[in-house]
Image (cartoon, rainbow, N blue to C red):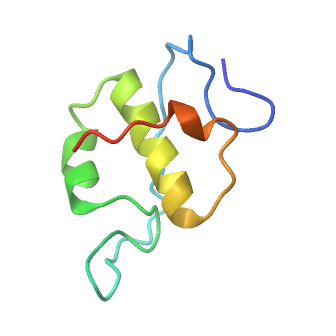
Amino acid sequence: MVLAEGGFAEDFDGVVSSPCISICRMTADRSHCQGCFRTLEELRAWGKADAVQRREIWGRLLVRAGVEHPAPDRVHASD
């Protein structure tokens, strides 16, 4: 289930859509994509990531994008 205020409920087990918006270019410092805010590592990992990992990526990219995340305490770095 997707939460009304944005983000995913902890028990969500559906398909986690890609954040790609077809603006695929890296920032000048190559820290992340200007379109979806994913890092190179996250872009590489996406295809093999399970739903939990994809939600974690979404949480980190929302923070990177400056979007208020409904539950930042649920976002865990995997590095």
Left or right of residue 1, residue 28 in this image:
left
**How far from the left and from the top, in percent, is residue 31?**
29, 73
Q: Which of these two is toward me, 33 or 20?
A: 33
Count of marks placed on residues: 0
Q: Residue at x 47, y 23 (%)?
A: 15
- Residue 34, by quadrant, is bottom left
| 12 shown above or below 55 | above
Outermost right residue: 4
Left or right of residue 45, residue 8 in this image:
right
| 70 shown above or below 62 | above
Q: Residue at x 55, y 53 (%)?
A: 62
| 57 shown above or below 8 | below
Q: Residue at x 45, y 49 (%)?
A: 60
Q: Which of these two is toward me, 56 or 34?
A: 56
Q: Residue at x 25, y 78 (%)?
A: 30
**How far from the left and from the top, in percent, is residue 18?**
44, 44
Q: Quadrant of the N terminus?
A: top right
Q: Quadrant of the C terminus?
A: top left
Outermost bottom residue: 28
**How far from the left and from the top, in percent, is residue 39?**
30, 61
